[in-house]
Image: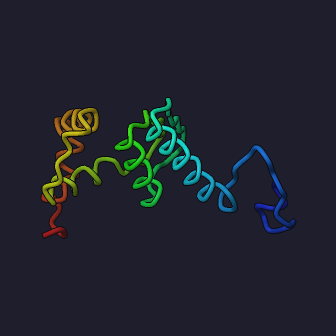
């Protein structure tokens, strides 16, 4: 796999490992859709994702849709997560987040912290 990632070898056919940039994105979207289908059919559905960062808009949108369909989602994000900017924009465009009480609670808690208050778009001189 190292040779593949460095461009020294051809892409390996892996059955159990998803690897970026080759298969990770498309397969994650398929797996999220599968869990969404389970939830809509009344079956137990859960997604647990542990990543260094969660910034890809298509993946975030898929997770929101799955959550709305009833999938239990647990995210373990080590550094960058675009949840707060997404919530900020939802509030900005007056989207009702009542179906997501946990997200609203996380957002409310974050917005009590000085770092989040200072990082808010309305606090940025170039965001006017």
Q: Nearer the viewer, residue 26 or 37?
A: 37
Q: Quadrant of the C terminus?
A: bottom left
Residue 76 rendering spot, x and y as whole percentages? 48, 35
Q: Residue at x 19, y 70 (%)?
A: 126
Specify the quadrant of the image occupied by residue 71.
top left
13 displayed left or right of 82: right
Q: Position of residue 45 (x, y in %)?
A: 50, 33
Q: Height in image: 42 above or below 116?
A: above
Q: Is residue 126 left or right of residue 61?
A: left
- The residue shown at (58%, 47%) is 31
Q: Is residue 79 left or right of residue 21?
A: left
* Most foreground residue, 120 or 43: 43
Q: Quadrant of residue 6?
A: bottom right
Q: Residue 59, position in %: x, y?
A: 47, 55
Quadrant of res 75: top left
Q: Is residue 109 above or below residue 65?
A: above
For image coordinates 50% across by 29% down, the residue present is: 44
Where 89 sits versus 70, above or below? below
Vertical arrangement, residue 126 with respect to residue 106, above or below: below
User: Furthest-right residue in view?
Assistant: 9
């Amino acid at each position: 796999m190292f040779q593949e990632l460095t461009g020294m070898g051809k892409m390996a056919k892996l059955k159990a490992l998803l690897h970026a940039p080759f298969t990770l994105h498309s397969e994650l979207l398929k797996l999220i859709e599968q869990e969404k289908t389970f939830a809509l059919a009344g079956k137990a559905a859960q997604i647990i994702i542990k990543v260094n960062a969660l910034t890809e808009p298509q993946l975030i949108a898929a997770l929101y849709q799955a959550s709305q369909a009833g999938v239990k989602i647990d995210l373990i994000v080590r550094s960058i997560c675009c949840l707060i900017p997404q919530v900020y924009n939802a509030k900005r465009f007056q989207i009702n987040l009542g179906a997501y009480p946990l997200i609203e609670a996380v957002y409310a808690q974050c917005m009590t912290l000085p770092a989040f208050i200072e990082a808010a778009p309305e606090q940025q001189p170039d965001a006017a």
